[in-house]
Image (tube, rainbow, N blue to C red):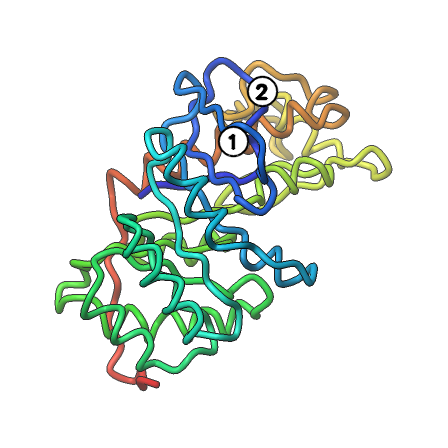
Amino acid sequence: MLIFTGGLLKTQYAPDLKLNILESYFYIGKRKLEIDRNYCKDFFLDSGAFSAWSKGKHIDINSYISFIKKNKDQIDHYANLDEIGNPEKSQQNLLKMEAEGLNPIPVYHYGEDFCVFKKMYEKYDFIALGGMVTISTKNREQWLDQIFDYSCNEDGTCNKKFHGFGMTTFDLLKKYPWFSVDSVSPVMTAAMGGIFFEQGQTLDLSREKTTPLALQRYLEGGSYMNSKGEEIQIKRKESMEGFTFDQMKNDYKVRMIINLRYVMDLERELTENPPIFKRNDQISLF
C-alpha cells in the first residue's frame, strides 16, 4: 500500500524521510514542478477539483492537460479532472484527456449512482474514490463496504487498484485492500499540537494544555516505579526517537517528523501484510 501525504512538495523535515507525496494542480497552478527524488518516492498529481469547487473556482481542462504533458516524466500518477456533482461532465473530461494520449485515473464519488462505478469497474484497472472528506465515518464505511464487496474476490483480495482520496481513518486503511490513499492528517495534526500514537490515536501536546506526568514519562522513555515498587521500563515508539518531551510539545516540525515516521511505518506494515477484506453477506448493494 502507498500512503501519500499532501502539502509537502517543497518541504523536507528530516533526512530519513522519503515520502509519497500528493499535490493538487489547483494549488500548484503555473509554478514549475520540481520533484526531488531524494525526498519523494512516488508523486501523485490530483486535479484539485474538490478544492476548486469548494472555493467557487474553475479549472481549465486544457491547462490541466498541458501541465501533465509538460511534466509527465515527473508524475507517477494523475487523476482525471472530475466535476463535483456532475458525473457526465467528469466522463467527458476523462474521454478528452484520453483522446490527448493521457491515462488519468477516473474518480468515483460518494453519492453517485452505482451504475457509474460499475462502468468504471468494467473498463479501468485503477479507480480513485472521492467525496469522502465531509462524510461521517459510519456512512463512509458503509459505502466502502459495498464497493469492496462488489470488487473483491472470495478470498478478500482485489484484482483492481483503488486510491482513497482524503482517507484519514486508520481503521479503514487497515480494513480494505487499498493500492494507495492520501491524507493531510500528519501535517494538520502536527500543526494543531498533536502526534500520532498507538493505533492511530492522537496525543494533544499543545502548549496551552497540561500534559499528565505519566504521559510525559512515557514520551521521554526511561522507567517508572509502579504501585508495587517495581521498576517498569518504558519503550517509546521508534518514530519519537531523538526528541525530548519539550521538543515534541513545543516544536511543530518535530511533531511533523514523528507523524511522518508513523505513516512510513504504517505503510511498510500494510505493504508487508496487505488487508484482506472480510465479505459480509448482510451488505446490500446500491
Q: Which residue is disc 1 drawn over?
A: 260
Looking at the rendered image, the disc whose residue lies closer to the viewer, 1 or 2, is 2
What quarter of the picture does the N terminus occupy?
top left
Q: Is residue 170 left or right of residue 128?
A: right
Kind of residue sitting beneath label 2? Tyr
Q: Which residue is mark 2?
A: 13
Which of the 4 quarters of the picture holds residue 19?
Answer: top left
Q: Position of residue 140 (x, y in %)?
A: 47, 69
Locate residue 58, reporting x and y percent: 61, 59
Residue drawn at 54 percent across, 16 percent down: 14
Position of residue 77 in the picture relative to residue 262 (left or right): left
Question: Is there CB contact under 8 Å for labels 1 and 2?
Answer: yes
Q: Nearer the viewer, residue 36 or 228?
A: 36
Report which quarter residue 147 is drawn in. bottom left
Residue toward you, 139 or 59: 59
The tally of labels here is: 2
What amino acid is at disc 1?
A: Leu
In the displayed structure, 213 sits above or below 36; it is below
Please report whichever mark, 1 or 2, sits nearer to the chain's N-terminal start. 2
